Amino acid sequence: MGEDLVSTLLGWIILFAFIIFYPRLMLSQLLNRLESSAQALETLSKRARVLIMKKIGRRDKRLEASIEEMQNFVVIEPSSLDPFGIVKKIDQIFRTMERRFEEFVDEVAPKKSRKEKREINFALRAAIGVHSIAKLVRHYVELIKRFRNLQLALILQMQLPLIERIAKSEYAGVEAFVKGLPVGDGIGPLCAALLIEGEAKPIAEDVVAYEREIEGRKVIVLKATGPEPSLGRIDEAIAKLVKGRKVAKVITIDAATKLEGERTGSVASGVGFAMGSFEREIAENVLLPRGIPIEAIVIKVGFEEAIEPMKPEIAEASKVVLEHLRQMISRTRRKGVIIVAGIGNSSGIGNDRREALKAIELVKRIRTRRVVKRKTFVFKRVEKQ
């Protein structure tokens, strides 16, 4: 009887001790893991700055401080309380942001060529993404430490694999832009460049145009100027082409975020203006009131693959895209011009077919897996410290 009582009391004591101390032990273990991840992300942010400084050609504390200051650059969206004119407001804010980045690059790398300045410009934008993620994770880690909140720690820990994937892709984007490599989002300009067999002429801000015949129909091909990183103002180019011309159809080619389970590089076609920014609104306001048909070809890529160096399977999708494009053009009436716009970042992709084929060969030589392993090692190394 006495032994049963002692056993029962001991069991209750162990149970209460477990209830009291286990959450604290779990929180301590989670904090160690979260702290390691926060440090790893901060290391990635610092390494991104180092890559940019190497591209600039000098490394000193003053330059690093300037780049870090730009990594904290913020863009405040305009008020949408009155939605009328919101697109024009966003356009103006966006242009101001573009000018600020250009001014900064001119200040830190005045002797670089235009191509190198654009590479630094876009590498800096990707570095801002890495830095923002590192700051956000650090914020929540410090919040958890301050309030000893186990629930918040569990939520953050569950999200960390996805957060780290995004951070790694942003860092890979810094590497890609610094080296002038094609990125996943460049599949649109790549397909457009494959259609250009002569000299493309500037038509709008950072956009070139080339006129040719496909399937017996007059086609004007648009793409962002390359091989320097650029997105171009495709909306402005389309607005210029529509004036004084009878446009039979507009076809856009762009990368689209794939669902998990979908194959990278798979191609789908449909209707609508394939573009992921406010410029789509501007272009639609020009095209839709005129009753101009809009069709689209999208190439499926993962959200992290869009900014990473382009994978061979994405580049190979260009063959399928061009086949879809010819089918769309053959279905179009012969009267009027067809506008084909390659939407996306032109990093590493020149303005004609010869340069496009060079980019495809370069993509095949890029060992993306080794790059990813090297980035993953950063996290493992910091965790061991």
Image (tube, helix red, strand yellow):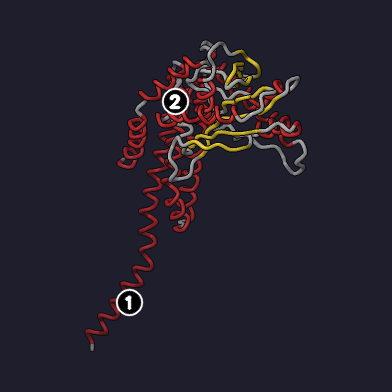
* In the image, residue 327 above or below residue 57: below
Q: Position of residue 309 (x, y in %)?
A: 43, 28
Q: Position of residue 271 (x, y in %)?
A: 62, 37
Residue lying at 52% horizontally and 12% vertically, measured from the top left? 113
Q: Nearer the viewer, residue 115 or 65?
A: 115
Q: How many marks?
A: 2
Residue lying at 60% horizontally and 23% vertically, measured from the top left? 232
Q: Which residue is mark 2?
A: 176
Give residue 12's mark.
1
Q: Is residue 121 visible?
A: no
Q: Position of residue 260 (x, y in %)?
A: 45, 45
Q: Alpha-carbon distance for marks 1 and 2?
A: 60 Å
Q: Along the polypeptide, which appears first: circle 1 or circle 2?
A: 1
Q: Nearer the viewer, residue 216 or 237?
A: 216
Q: Quadrant of residue 25?
A: bottom left
SS class, disc 2: helix
How many C-alpha atoms fall within 10 Å of the one at disc 2: few (<14), some, or many (≥20)? Answer: many
Residue lying at 49% horizontally and 25% vertically, measured from the top left? 123
Q: Nearer the viewer, residue 1 or 232?
A: 232
Q: Position of residue 107 (x, y in %)?
A: 56, 17
Q: Is residue 222 visible?
A: yes
As drawn, the residue found furthest toward the bottom would be: 1
Q: Tell me the quarter of the image containing the C terminus.
A: top left
